[in-house]
Image (cartoon, rainbow, N blue to C red):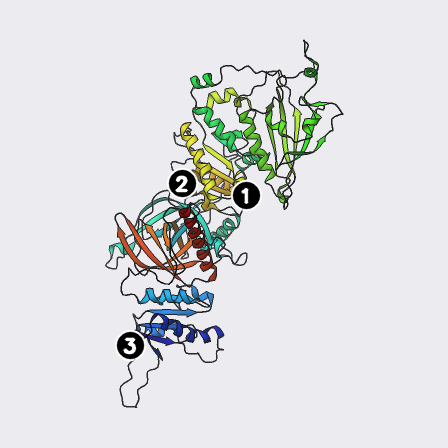
Amino acid sequence: MVKVGFLFEKREAEAVDPILQTAQSELRRWTLELLPDAEFHILKLDFKPPKPDAPPEPPPKVDLILWNEAGPPLAKLRSIPEYKDTPVIAIVSDPHLADPTHPAVQTSSDILLLPTERLIYLQKLELLLAKDEAVTQSFLFELKLETEDPKLRFDIGKRVQITHLSETSCTVISPVPMLRGLEGTLASNVFWNERESPSWKDRLVEVRVQDSMPYLDSTMASSEATDMKYEVRLRYFALRQSQLRNLRVWLAKNLKAKWPDIERSPNKAKQSFRVALISPRADAETTMRSSLENLTNIDIVRHQGLQGFLLDLKEKSVSPQAKTENHPTLAVSGIPYHPDFIGPRQPEEMIPPLHHASVRFTIKSDDLFIEKIDPPPKAGARLMGHSLAVWEKDASPLIQALGPSERTIFQETLDWIASGTRAELADRKSSLHLTFQPVPWICQKFDTRLRLVSPREGQSSPVVEIELTHEPTSEPASHSAQDKTTRPTSSDTENTSHTGFEAIMIDASLLKTLSGEPGLIRERFQSIEAAMEKASLKNAFGNPPPVVLFSADDDFDATSLRGTVVRQLIYRFEDRRYFAELFISLSRPELWTSPGLAVAEFAADLDAAIFRPTKLEAISEAGFRIVDRIPFKSAATLRVLSSLWPHREQPIWARVRRVQANESLYAEDFVFLAVDDEIQRAIRNYGLQEHVNRKKSQMS
């Protein structure tokens, strides 16, 4: 027989919560479903003797206690020796008490947030009363993940203490060492301003581990020495402008010494920094040079998009002999049009490609439908060697006139232009230098400018303007990708090809066409990493150059870059001091630190939590199971972040129920604490969809 104690006394001068008022009868009824012979006791903490001279009445022995926030303090219950170790389920209706670190519920065994569901309560009751830790769930569907889901992110967070801070990194004290390069998330109030945003997510910053070393303090040599601890240096992988601003305010108030200013040298920089800049933005190069003024001389090799960069790397990885076989001749079939050309020609060959010095095509990007040609050609005229009847259908002859490499670059730039919003109209413009050969007798290079006229609204297609301007040249045009003016000159390539790049800067807006899918983003960067390795791309130190993603919007999810070659994410804002710090620390990627920007100590104590990814093996509405390399202590309370609830504004808590060793890994069972309907619905929807997909695959 199981004895259940109720501690639902109402405090004086307090109104009765209607939710709590009905909880006792509901929980009693649900308990009898699992334990038909259960015995219930209404507990009172004032045990008075029946007679003045009689001994105090001992408290009744129970196997489980149900306590709610309207009853006496839980600490008072735990002060009674008979109830010191008795399992307690805290029944709360206040979301603030759903935090297991709150003093009111700190000693509870589990937390149930009202209103709750019958099956959730029965599952928690079964797991809490189980004599065997290996008991499996009976009341809820448990989804087992047989294969790893690349879209599913599951991070476990543990409390740490921050001891040093800077604007690019920090140092924390951790109970376990962390591998260099480990990806995770740091949660701390130094990045957050409650007046600006109530969201708990603004405390979160994606970080990367630099190194770990044993932490030695005064207690290590005393008789009160605790377990071994480690000093872990973390680098901020992505820091939003608001988080940087809040961090600076906190540092100004709490530093032991004044924060050093970064002074720019009046002398002209002598060192050179060769950068591959991958961005379709017209002002990207100017902005980068301005940000690093007086710090370095920048040698920029410009690419319009990722596909152009990949094509360039592919060309670098091909041997000279293979290049000769693939391109046996540099001659082209087309003859660049020149108005003063003298010689035998057919009448159509004498017509210039453009009927005006500059021609603008206004098109719908979805189907390439031409809305307008400005200035309009005269009736019977030819444009790019084709009659006007051809252009009345769509602008596809324009794209088909490009070679394979330049066609890829043009299409990627067009997609980037078309993905802009109304707020980005002024920003969504780009310039290309492309060679067109629409018909055999025309091969001409044009300055090709694209800009967004109107963005996508509902079902309406984005409208893009493409302007072609004649670009005179004294040399024959070529379809070779080496002739694009967005690349370095041949002499520059010969002088610097052996050093590669010191950094590769990629515009984050180029990833918008991937619809924000983490799997697609990872695949794109995997192809970049493979191409870099095949082309033996190195920096001046002989190491692979760091890849930096810049100009990301505030809603860009930094966790989508885990497992990729990207070493730094920069959000879109102007801050020359911050960019200078990043440049100094990233210019020597093999050191990953800056001697002139040492992290500083501060006077205040600061708690934080570090989240690291783990492998989810099974999940239900009551708990989950992970497989990890490090065992957690039984009954440890940890935080959970997951892509299952990406818009969650408050942290989710879980408690370790069982740890089981399995060769070099550990299977660890957790129980959710005080999860509300939002989390249960997210888990239910995910599990149901996976279950349906599995049934479909079995039937097929």
Q: Position of residue 378 (x, y in %)?
A: 76, 25
Q: Determine which residue is flagged by label 2.
A: 593
**Of callouts 3 and 2, the N-terminal one:** 3
Q: Determine which residue is flagged by label 1.
A: 572
Estimate how packed mark 2 is, as few (under 14), some (14 to 19) or many (20 or more) residues with alpha carbons within 10 Å: many
The relative height of residue 431 versus residue 671 in the rendered view (above or below) is above
Q: Position of residue 164 (x, y in %)?
A: 40, 50
Instruction: Point out the residue furthest to the left here.
Output: 223
Q: Comparing marks 1 and 3, which lies closer to the viewer?
A: 3
The relative height of residue 306 versus residue 612 in the rendered view (above or below) is above
Secondary structure of the residue carrying tag 1 is loop
Tell me which corner region of the image, top left, top right, bottom left or bottom right, holds residue 587: top left
Q: Position of residue 177 (x, y in %)?
A: 32, 48
Q: Which mark is residue 188?
A: none
Q: Nearer the viewer, residue 194 or 678?
A: 678
Q: Comparing marks 3 and 2, which lies closer to the viewer?
A: 3
Q: Determine which residue is flagged by label 3.
A: 61
Residue type at numbered disc 3: Lys
Q: Quadrant of the N terminus?
A: bottom left
Secondary structure of the residue carrying tag 3 is loop
Residue type at numbered disc 1: Arg
Q: CA distance from mark 3 to mark 2?
A: 60 Å
The relative height of residue 334 versus residue 511 in the rendered view (above or below) is above
The relative height of residue 231 versus residue 675 in the rendered view (above or below) is above
